[in-house]
Image (cartoon, rainbow, N blue to C red):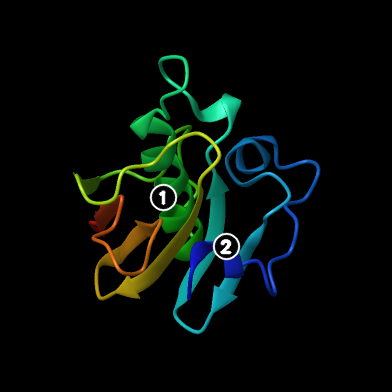
């Protein structure tokens, strides 16, 4: 599925969920079986340098989804202990682009990717591991 076609079935974020509202706007978050998906639109709120999307925004959006998928909400920045491995370097993103985010549950966390073009490597991929405390 191309990111521009991925809006079907997405529900808007609740107005009181400020942090998710910034990342996902009116795109919302959809639970599909063992995973979550959403859309991130690279707009002026996501830029680092003028005209260039900030990779940290994409990383934070994926972390928000991983924490939600696993039902983890402890602490101000997610549950502890956890580890995240991010990989960037696939398709580049520019302001105005729409990226599809898909995460699936794994035995000890979640794994996912942020895709601009399904025919190109992901803009961002990540593996999240949550350890028992």
How packed is label 1: few (under 14 Cα within 10 Å), some, or many (20 or more)? many
* 132 left or right of 93 in image: left
Choose top left, top right, bottom left or bottom right for residue 119.
bottom left
Give coordinates of residue 10: x percent, y percent.
68, 67
Mark sitting earlier along the chain (1/2): 2
Disc 1/disc 2 C-alpha distance (Å): 18 Å
* Closer to the camera in the image, 87 or 64: 87
The answer to whether residue 129 is visible is: yes
Which residue is label 2 attached to? 4
Residue farthest to the top, as pictured: 50
Relative to 58, residue 3 above or below: below
* 52 left or right of 9 in image: left
Give coordinates of residue 72: x percent, y percent.
45, 55
Residue at 56% from the left image edge and 39% from the top image edge: 96
Residue farthest to the right, as pictured: 15
Give coordinates of residue 21: x percent, y percent.
68, 41
Q: Is mark 1 on a helix, strand or loop?
A: helix
């Amino acid at each position: 599925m191309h990111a521009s076609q991925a809006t079907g079935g997405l529900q808007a974020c609740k107005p009181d969920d400020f942090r998710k509202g910034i990342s996902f706007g009116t795109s919302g978050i959809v639970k599909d079986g063992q995973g979550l998906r959403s859309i991130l639109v690279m707009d002026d709120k996501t830029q680092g340098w003028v005209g260039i999307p900030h990779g940290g925004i994409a990383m934070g959006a994926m972390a928000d989804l991983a924490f939600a998928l696993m039902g983890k909400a402890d602490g101000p920045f997610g549950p502890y202990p956890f580890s995240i491995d991010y990989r960037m370097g696939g398709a580049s993103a520019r302001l105005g682009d729409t990226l599809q985010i898909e995460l699936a549950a794994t035995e000890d966390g979640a794994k996912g990717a942020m895709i601009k073009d399904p025919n190109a490597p992901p803009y961002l991929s990540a593996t999240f591991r949550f350890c028992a405390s």
